[in-house]
Image (cartoon, rainbow, N blue to C red):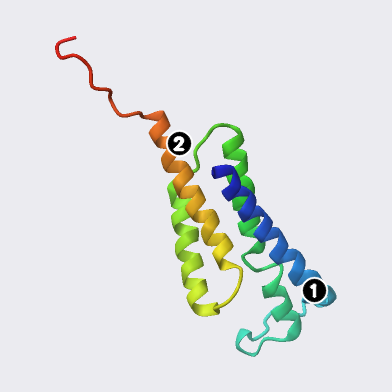
Amino acid sequence: MIKWAGWLMALIGAAHTFLALTVEEAARHADAWFSGELWGEDLSAMSPANSGYWLSLASFGIPLMVVGLMVLWLDRRGIVPPPFIAWTLGIWTAVCAVILGPSPWPIVLLANVLLLVGARRAARQDNPAPQAGPQGA
């Protein structure tokens, strides 16, 4: 479950960034991004270049991909990711779902649930419940 969670997070993050840069054509503003054109721009009156930047490179996509890759890295080494990762991303996902409405948020929420369940199962395997045995043994 932990591996699935990591893959889902990494793939959603990468897909969001890639699709924003290509399908939404945010990359066409790269010259403005790297020329300093966005410096000092009023965020309340966002230009198309600034909007494209916040939709792609400055979005949640790259950090979500990094978190997913970190979860996979930990899993490969037999380290259970701490539950605060799933709880934090789950709360963030729920807030974004309320604000944004229809989007791929259910996939990210699924990844969070898988991560929590996988971490709980791994914790139970590491600390099995004491077995009832004969008294005085």
Number of marks drawn: 2
Q: Nearer the viewer, residue 58 or 107?
A: 107
SS at circle 1: loop
Give the CA separation, mark 1 to mark 2: 40 Å
Q: Which residue is mark 2?
A: 122
Q: Is residue 114 above or below residue 39?
A: above
The foreground one among 118 and 55 is 118
Q: Is residue 29 left or right of residue 78?
A: right
Residue 24: x percent and y percent?
A: 77, 76
Question: Is 116 drawn above or below residue 62 in the view shown?
Answer: above
Does residue 73 show up?
yes
Residue name at image x 74 percent, y 84 percent? 48
Check disc 1 and report the residue beneath it. Answer: 23
- Where does residue 58 sit, x and y in percent of width and height? 66, 68
> Given contact means CB atoms under 8 Å apart, are the residues at marks 1 and 2 in contact?
no
Of residues 124 and 20, the one drawn nearer to the viewer in this rendering = 124
How crowded pointer 2 is (Cα within 10 Å; few <14, some 14-19, many 20+) is rated as: some
Residue 53: where, in percent of width, then height?
Answer: 72, 74
Q: Residue at x 48, y 43 (%)?
A: 118
> Where residue 107 sits in the image (x, y, percent)?
58, 61
